[in-house]
Amino acid sequence: MICVRVPASSANMGAGFDTLGIALNLYSVVEVAERKSGLEIISNTGGDTVHNDKHNLIYRAMERVFERTDYHPKGLFIRQNSKIPMTRGLGSSSACIVGGMLAANVLSGRQLRYTDILHMASQMEGHPDNVGPALYGGLCISANIDDRTVVKSTKLVNDLKYVVMIPDFFVATKKSRGTLPDFVSRQDAASNISSSLMLYHSLVAGDFSELKYGVADKLHQPYRKSYIDGFDDIFEKTYENGSLATYLSGSGPTIMSIIEGDGKEFAYKMESFFRLSSRKWRCTVLECDNVGSVVWETPDQ
């Protein structure tokens, strides 16, 4: 049995649209074994979008590796145990893609390098800012350059916590991306570049004085916030309760706050705020995962 543990990821990080992402200690575990025939898929993720046939995202990711390596398994058993909420902006699809590709690569004799898998996963996902952290861990700068995908991962050594605020509704990434304008002003583009650089420096250098400016975004959050009732009020309340920086995780609807300390008091205050405002959100305190995906093998069960 091949086992792959893949971390959740939070992309965009405010100003770093399609370029910045961070791995979090919330995991999807994919187990794969080759069988004599047939396809069996077991998943605890639930929901109408999870297929137990060849439309399954993990299986489709594995197929791409098998095509690339010219490997033809007779049958497959796939089991996923995931703690990453689906369609909430925490990289659930990237975890499936990366997990499936890494498992398929082991089955086919480890013919592909991680750089190959990174590029294939980025092509399948459509952008690299989730697959980079899912594969390598840490804080990642990602880019598609010509016909390759490049990721630079920095392992964070600070004690910051990342409080994810997850609502009881979802926003499809395709729908959310469709709200974005095709063109932006030079001024807005320059603003995002400076903010994203400030964010990266703040997290790596441990200087959090300008972290709030580092997540200031003009490219996607102003357009996506219309899908979230009370968006501005929630952001304002996070800063009142001590957030260093708050941003929309991925395409949302999860909202992320970066916190000093253990994050428990902040999470309690935000959950109280959500209850009083009759909004159904839950808070989870997470840390940066600096390891990335882990692969191991166990005897078949």
Image: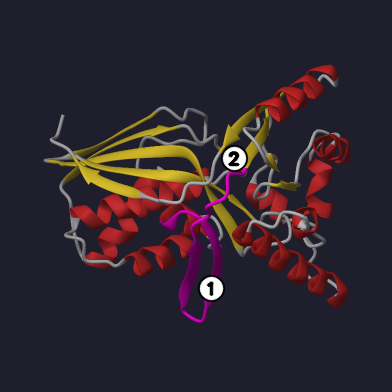
Position of residue 28 measured from the top left corner of the image (x, y, whole percent): 42, 38
Q: Name the amino acid type tagged 1.
A: Asn
> Separation of disc 2 and disc 1 at Cα?
24 Å
Q: Name the amino acid type tagged 2.
A: Thr
Residue sitting at x 15%, y 40%:
37
Residue sitting at x 60%, y 33%:
285
User: In which quadrant is the C terminus drawn?
Assistant: top left
Position of residue 265 measured from the top left corner of the image (x, y, whole percent): 70, 26
Asked whether residue 158 is drawn in magenta, I would say: yes
Residue sitting at x 78%, y 37%:
242
Q: Which mark is residue 144?
A: 1
Q: Residues within 10 Å of mark 1 (few under 14, many from 20)?
A: some
Residue that sits furthest to the bottom in the current view: 146
User: Residue 138 versus residue 201: which sits nearer the camera?
Assistant: 201
Position of residue 158 measured from the top left corner of the image (x, y, whole percent): 57, 50
Q: Return the disc, 2 or 1, that comes first in the chain's sequence.
A: 2
Residue range highlighted in magenta:
136-160
Q: Quadrant of residue 255?
A: top right
Asked whether residue 90 is drawn in magenta, I would say: no
Q: Is residue 207 above or below residue 171?
A: below
Name the residue tied to disc 2: 87
Q: Is residue 218 left or right of residue 11?
A: right
Q: Is residue 279 above or below residue 157?
A: above
| Closer to the eye: label 2 or 1 | 1
Q: Which mark is residue 57?
A: none
Residue 10 in sight here? yes
Residue 17 in sight here? no
User: In which quadrant is the N terminus drawn?
Assistant: top left
Q: Secondary structure at mark 2?
A: loop
Q: Secondary structure at mark 1?
A: strand
Does the CB distance between marks 2 and 1 fall below 8 Å? no
